[in-house]
Structures are given as structure tokens and as C-alpha cells.
Image: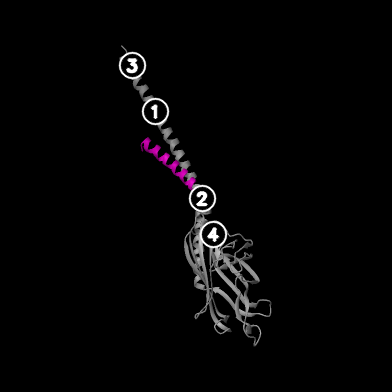
Amino acid sequence: MSAPVEASRGTFLVALGAFLLTLAALLPLYVHDRVALLPASAEFELRMVDEDAAYLDAATWSLRQGVEVRRVTRIDATPHGGDWSAWEMSVDVSTPERMIDHWSRRVIVDRVTGRAVNCCGEHVNGDRAIRQAGLVLHWPAGAPAEDVTHYDAEVRSAPLLEYDGADQVAGIPVRRYVQTIDATQVPDSARSVPAALFTADAEGTVTAARWVEITRTYWVEPVSGLVVNAQETRAERLRPRGGGGEVGLLSAELTLSEGQVTTLAEQARVRAFLLTALDTWAPWILVPLGGLAVLAGLVQAWRTRETAHRRRRDLDEHGDRVGGLGEARDRP
């Protein structure tokens, strides 16, 4: 093989090694962080169901039991600036026959932290004076094994979500977090209801507000930070202004369907695999390969240089011999 070809091979190997080493640094330090961001654009929904719930039928003001109640959260996320996303959220609570409750929310989400940002027309049911805080839904990548705040738009505060240990969902390891909201009045929920709901044979109406008690559990795949399962126990009551008893409004233990849990777990598994590959496996593979390529290129360059030196030395020696023979023939 000619010297120029050998030199080119050495240069190529050194350049390849440098590229692999640079890539090994960029993947965990830059690419991983970009991939770990929550999606700027997304459209999805969480469908929670209790097939044996109880609720107060406002058409007849009677308690209906053993009814299927659905709580559907729809999310439409669009890009908003560099690392923010605007989430338009709506929640519908219904039976197969009628709507029980509906409310909407707009929140700006920091795609790095998963937390609400006070900006740009945020509201809950049109109330633009509120200031949302804490996690909105998903955790950031690398979900910590510690308590976090998580915003509840109904009570308009961010109660603590307590870390409740490791678990497993659909074959993947997860972290479990539990949020407990004690009996709290829902802002702007006061309305006129029949007084007979609280006092037998009473006439007319009274003003009553909605109170909620919630125990909410999330199962989170820690590498991706994605929620893969959720469960919610709700007890809602109507309480008249000034006291005087209460009446049940909704009692439900809401869960995601097994099919939806499987889908969410698979999405988290794929995302966790990609993030782990970028942060750990790729550098461990690329650094040795890059180092070997640089070493091989340097060895190749050294061999090429040595070969060139040897050829020049041989040519010089050959020239000296030829010159000596010529001088001998020229002597008389």
C-alpha cells in the first residue's frame, strides 16, 4: 500500500476517534437534556372510571348508587416559547346518561421541570387571578424519590404529594406518590339547592357549596418521569352556608383502565430506554471506540512516518553505492 494511502487511513482514524469522543460528550450533556424535555406539542386524555359509584342526581335531588361514573381529563399542549408549553385542559365528570361536572384550565408548563409557570393567560374556569404552582401532571426526567407539590385546580392550591415507596406497574419499576386533600371548599361552587336536602319538609332554597376530600395516587416511571397509572378516591358533599348538615354529592374510586395503563407503561419504557442509552450506554461504548480509533490512527501515522524514513534511508544508501561505483569506473 502506498504511503499517501496509509497516511490518509491514519488521518481518517484519528478524525473518526475525535468525532466519537465528541459525540460521547454531547449525548449525555446536550442531547439527553433535549430529549428529556416534556413534549412541546401533545394531545392526549386520561379516562378514569368507577363502575359502582354514587352521585346526587340534580334532576330529582336523589342519591343514585351503583352507577358508572367517568372522569375524563383532556389535554391539548402547544409550544410556547423555547422550553415552555401551553396546556389547555378540560375535565368532564359524567355518567352514561348525563354530565355531572365540567371545568377547564389553562396552564403554562415548564418542559424541563414539569411545573406550572405564572404567565400568559393562565386560568381555572376563567379565573385569571389564580397563580398555579407545582407539578401539573408528569414529573421531570429522573423523578426524585421525595415529596413534591402538585397543583389541584379544583381547590386551587398545591398540596404535597408524598413519596410512598417503590412499586411495579405493567412489569416496569415505578415510584408511588400519594396526595391527600382534607375536606376543602371548592372556590366559586356556591349555588342554590332545595332546603329539603338538609332539613326534612323545609321549603324554598338555601345556598350550599361543594366540599371535596381526595386521596390521589400516581405511579411514575422514574427515568422518564411519566405517569403510568393513577387512582383517585373522591368524596364530594354539599354543605349549606352557615352549617346545618351536609348531603353526599359524589362518592367514587376512580381508576385508569388496564389497557390505558399498559399503553402508558410502554411509552414510559421506550422513553426510559432512550434516555438511559443517551446518558449511560452510549458514552460507555463510544469513549472506548473513540480512544481505540485515535490510538490506531496515531499508530498508523507513526508506521507511515517510519516507513517513509526507511525508504528515504534506503534510497540514500543506494545512491551512495551507485555514486561509489561510478567513481571507481572513472579512475585511470
Question: Marks 1 and 2, how far apart in space?
Answer: 49 Å
Q: Earlier in the sequence, mark 2 or mark 4?
A: 2
Helix, strand or loop at label 3? It is: helix
Q: Quadrant of residue 315?
A: top left
Q: Earlier in the sequence, mark 3 or mark 1?
A: 1
Q: CA distance from mark 3 to mark 1?
A: 24 Å
Residue 180 location, x and y as percent?
64, 69
Q: Position of residue 202 (x, y in %)?
A: 65, 86
For marks 1 and 2, the one nearer the N-term is 2
Residue depth check, mark 4 versus mark 1: number of the one nearer the observer? 4
Point out the tag, 4 or 1, that comes first from the N-terminus.
4
Q: Is residue 260 visible?
A: yes
Amino acid under label 1?
Arg
Q: Main secondary structure of the magenta part?
A: helix
Task: Give the residue displayed 34% in from the left and 20% down from the top.
Answer: 323
Q: What residue is shown with label 1?
A: 312
Q: Residue placed at 39% from the left, 30% from the top?
A: 311
